[in-house]
Image (spheres, helix red, strand yellow):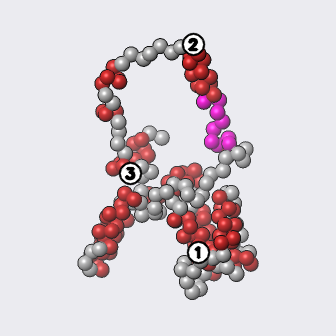
Amino acid sequence: FSLSVLLQVGFFPSECVELINDKVPQSVTNSVPKPVSKKHGKLITFLRTFMKSRPTKQKLKQRGILKERVFGCDLGEHLLNSGHDVPQVLKSCTEFIEKHGIVDGIYRLSGIASNIQKLRHEFDSEQIPDLTKDVYIQDIHCVGSLCKLYFRELPNPLLTYQLYEKFSDAVSAATDEERLVKIHDVIQQLPPPHYR
């Protein structure tokens, strides 16, 4: 991907990216490269050959060597790799909660830690766990806790560090009507993966 495409898609907000082309000192761009010794030349040739012969990410995934992380992975990167519009973990958990989770404190009370870790491991192993198992039906709060865990571990929060000040200003508006308009305006500025 070119940088302009990534900026457009919203993986790297333009205000957070600084191009360095103009900042490279002229002394560096005009300098003549030093001759490479025979020993270093062989090393460079070896490294080039090694880099070219590396298997692609796709091949590593097919062989089961590489597994894509779900938790603690950048939202845009995860969606790009998985080909989903929203993370499967959130889709599965919210569907389950809408069906079975009309209980007191679904997001306030915490589930049993071992159940949360079991679910996390299954999603991280690219499996979709069966949430209708008795162990999860009897501990519905572990599914709500898993959702919170997913959001908590995003490297860049759902509402993004870049828009933090704007969200803060929006919720500080004087009236409900003004607050609603400002929040709506900031939400429109979210990168597409976060907006969805």
Q: Which residue is mark 1?
A: 144
Q: Can residue 86 be seen in the rendering of this structure?
A: no
**Going by the image, does 74 lie left or right of 25?**
right
Highlighted range, magenta = 51-60
* Closer to the eye: label 2 or 3: 2
Image disc number at residue 38:
2
**Element type at mark 3:** loop
The answer to whether marks 1 and 3 mark residues whose Cβ atoms lie closer than 8 Å is no
Residue type for callout 2: Lys
At a point 30% along the width and 80% down the height, the residue shown is: 176
For residue 25, side relative to residue 111 (left or right): left
Give the residue at mark 3. 13
Could you say where residue 156 lies in the image, as x and y percent from the top left? 46, 57
Label 2 environment density (alpha carbons within 10 Å; few <14, some 14–19, many ≥20) = few
Residue found 58% across the figure and 84% down from its top? 102
Identity of the residue drawn at 66% across and 36% down: 55
Q: Left or right: 36 with respect to 69?
A: left
Please report contact status of discs 2 and 1: CB closer than 8 Å, yes or no: no
**Residue 188 at x, y = what percent?**
36, 63
Dot 1: element: helix
